[in-house]
């Protein structure tokens, strides 16, 4: 996006819904892995338009280090777009791949509790054990274009 007196100009956009529609993402779209992949997709689109740098505008609030917005930022940076940031705010690779979600799944032993907490994953036909691998597959599809 570019700020102009007559109104902002959006050069590229990406939404997490595109992950399922175009890349086969089976997990919910509101988690950290989806945020990273959406950022990666936005970065890839920006590169195709010849854009090489961007600035992250998080608004007036200050998100927590490691949050989804910074996961998306990491995706944009990994796509090759230069964005000024402090590396300490970026979530670690294990969280980006969804390993924290898998670890929580493993800690919950009750079937009923698993169904309640992970119903949207299961509805998509994804077993939680496959989440990191599925993330890697979708990431590779986005990187190939």
Image (cartoon, grey):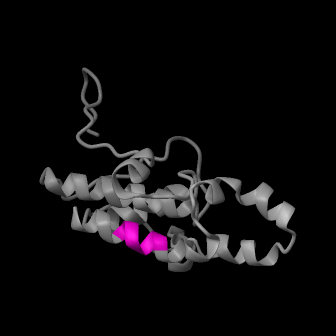
| Up/down of 104 relative to 120, above or below | below
Queried whether the magenta region covers residue 135, the answer comes back as yes
The N terminus lies in quadrant: top left
- Quadrant of the image for the C terminus? bottom left
Rendered location of residue 99, percent (x, y): 60, 76
Q: Nearer the viewer, residue 78 or 65?
A: 78
Instruction: Name the residue rendered at 31%, 53% in the picture.
Output: 42
Q: Residue furthest left?
A: 50
Rendering coords of residue 106 (x, y %): 75, 78
Which residue in the rendered view is the most extreme toward the top? 6
Horizontally, residue 115 falls left or right of residue 80, namely right
Horizontal arrangement in the rendering, residue 121 relative to residue 73 (left or right): right
Is residue 115 visible in this depiction of the protein? yes
**How far across and down, in percent of the image, does residue 87 sit?**
46, 73
Residue in the picture at 66% in, 74% down: 102
Left or right, 121 with reference to 76: right
Q: Which residues are magenta?
A: 134-139
Name which residue lies at 23% across and 40% down: 11
Residue 129 in the image: above or below residue 18? below
Q: Position of residue 31 (x, y in %)?
A: 58, 57
Q: Compared with residue 142, is residue 132 higher up or lower down, i.e. above or below?
A: below
The answer to whether residue 33 is left or right of residue 83 is right
Q: Is residue 4 magenta?
A: no
The secondary structure that most of the magenta stretch takes on is: helix
- Residue drawn at (15%, 54%) of the image: 48
The residue closer to the viewer here, 86 or 11, is 11
Determine which quarter of the picture holds residue 4. Answer: top left
Q: Is residue 91 visible?
A: no
């Amino acid at each position: 996006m570019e700020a102009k007196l007559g109104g902002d100009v959006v050069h590229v956009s990406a939404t997490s819904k595109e992950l399922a529609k175009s890349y086969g993402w089976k997990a919910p779209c509101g988690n950290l892995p989806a945020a990273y992949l959406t950022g990666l997709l936005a970065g890839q689109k920006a590169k195709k338009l010849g854009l090489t740098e961007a600035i992250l505008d998080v608004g007036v609030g200050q998100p927590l280090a490691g949050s989804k917005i910074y996961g998306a930022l990491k995706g944009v940076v990994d796509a090759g777009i230069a964005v000024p940031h402090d590396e300490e705010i970026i979530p670690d690779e294990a969280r980006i791949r969804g390993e924290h979600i898998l670890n929580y799944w493993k800690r919950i032993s009750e079937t009923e509790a698993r169904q309640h907490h992970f119903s949207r994953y299961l509805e998509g036909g994804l077993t939680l054990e496959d989440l990191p691998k599925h993330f890697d597959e979708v990431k590779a599809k986005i990187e190939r274009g």
